[in-house]
Image: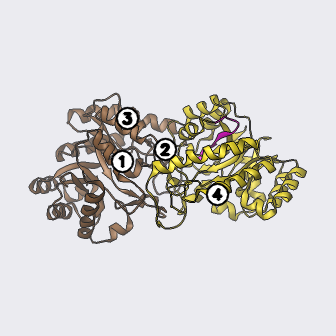
Chain colours: A brown, B yellow
Amino acid sequence: MSRLSLNQWTTRRWTVADAVDGCVRHGVEAIGLWRQDVAEQGLDVTLKLVHDAGLRVSSLCRGGFVTGDDRDSAYDDNRRAIDEAAALGAACLVLVVGGLTGVVPDKPLGAFSRDLAGARERVAEALAALAPYAQERGVRLALEPLHPMYCADRSVLSTLGQALDLAKPYGPETVGVVVDTFHVWWDPRVYDDIARAGRERRIASYQVCDFLCPLPSDVLLGRAMMGDGVIDFTPLTEAVDAARYEGDVEVEIFNADVWEADPDQVMATMKERYAALIGL
Amino acid sequence: MSRLSLNQWTTRRWTVADAVDGCVRHGVEAIGLWRQDVAEQGLDVTLKLVHDAGLRVSSLCRGGFVTGDDRDSAYDDNRRAIDEAAALGAACLVLVVGGLTGVVPDKPLGAFSRDLAGARERVAEALAALAPYAQERGVRLALEPLHPMYCADRSVLSTLGQALDLAKPYGPETVGVVVDTFHVWWDPRVYDDIARAGRERRIASYQVCDFLCPLPSDVLLGRAMMGDGVIDFTPLTEAVDAARYEGDVEVEIFNADVWEADPDQVMATMKERYAALIGL
């Protein structure tokens, strides 16, 4: 159980202080933080809370969204995110790269570009701009492929193989990848790509979360507590383990019912399901 | 415009007779039929209608759903579908292979299996059982990879590459693949795989349809008229053309607004958009 990490949005109504307390109360040794919650709590206060509680910061969510037209401000924001990850000693800064240029998540389509290849090129360019900055600060960028249903609005990075190709020019300590079960479980190549990620020492984060079926009306909330959806965690966890990933295992769930529930109950369920279904 | 085909569900409230009339009225030379509508109209009547109108049947939708526990009845149903495709002289029988064993589309999860690899194995087994039957009757089975968001409930076949691997043991005249823009547009490997499909002479159907963003609450209805979503059709169509696909190009749209609209208006819009955005 020592590798279990609470991603803060699993208990979304908790502040950083609440979540840190919750981790201590439930014996969870690591936490994945979100930038906006850290900003609300204050970076210095967060650092002190996490430090005093003896928690590891398994990830900071998130940088990315680099496919838009205003690159300067996107890159600036990512540099700030890198600084925050460095201050917090986070094991990685998760990058959700962004969708097609001009597409805004959850908004009707306005002016936008259908140039998918071009948007993907922008991700490579952003990485070239940001990786040296991250490297200087000892921060590991973690490219997160998102499920293809989010390709247009959230992430033109859709598979683990694509993430590994993007990471190639950089050292594995500077650019890694996230393996999130929700996003990759369907991929016929996922086992080959996890093995490749292991050989290339790229796995920066293993996130576990189930896939709801049928999907809810807001597909962003299709994530579920392990065991409540369709994913078989055993072969994926075994593959990540065989790839010699030794970091924390984050539980990150966006789900209306989970967010409605008592966060202490959510943590208790999370621990039970983790023990039964993940067990790393 | 001579290769444009109306998939019948684009004008879903029309019967087969209505849709055949519509094609004649609008100068569309081919039609993709659905089995349940053909059954309602009667197979012989349908055959006569299509023949008298001089239409090509670009596809029959659909066989498949072979991942469940009752294989005998699934295989029987597929053999009936093959017979119908043969009777109609359809260019192919589209196969939507089915999801995880026991998962029923649009229903809450009941008893089911999380064994994704096992479900995929069942597809290979079904193909081994059905391909000889199809070959004897001169019917081409067309494996349709569905968007990964349908992996659990409708199709464990998720990419074109996977479909081509499955097709490998069979002659290209017996087992081909469907390239449906909605399902494959996000795939970083799609251009390589379309080229491969061309080399292996596997493209049995090219279906065009846009991808809505944001997705509607029922993701099955996330399909849209070309131009109303996020897909850039030009590179996909060029790739299919370069792969020397010479068959019909079906417009297949499941969309609440399109189904609500006057079917004659839908056909007029379809022709305009086809000319502007596809143009094969």
Please say if the residues under marks 1 and 2 sit with CB atoms less than 8 Å apart. no
Labels 1 and 4 within one chain: no
Let me know if residue A225 appears in the view. Answer: yes
**Where is residue A91, by image quadrant?**
top left
The tag on residue A265 is none
Residue that badge 3 annotates: A164
Labels 1 and 2 within one chain: yes
Q: What is the x, y in percent for residue B215? A: 53, 57
Say what secondary structure mark 4 lies in. Answer: loop
Residue at the left extreme, as displayed? A52
Residue B115 lies left or right of residue B73; in this view the side is: left
Q: State the separation of the CA atoms marked 1 and 4.
A: 35 Å
Labels 2 and 3 within one chain: yes
Chain for mark 1?
A
Residue that badge 2 annotates: A100
Residue A27 lies left or right of residue A160; in this view the side is: left
Please say if the residues under marks 4 and 2 sit with CB atoms less than 8 Å apart. no
Whichever of labels 2 and 3 marks the residue nearer the N terminus, that label is: 2
Question: What residue type is disc 4 on?
Answer: Phe
Viewer-side label of 1, 2: 1
Q: State the separation of the CA atoms marked 4 and 2.
A: 23 Å
Viewer-side label of 3, 1: 1
Q: State the separation of the CA atoms marked 2 and 3.
A: 20 Å
Residue that badge 4 annotates: B254
Magenta segment range?
A: B170-182
Q: Name the image quarter holding the N terminus of chain B.
A: top right
Viewer-side label of 2, 3: 3
Q: State the separation of the CA atoms marked 4 and 3.
A: 35 Å
Q: What is the x, y in percent for residue A237? A: 32, 48
Q: Residue shown at 64%/54% (left/top)?
A: B75
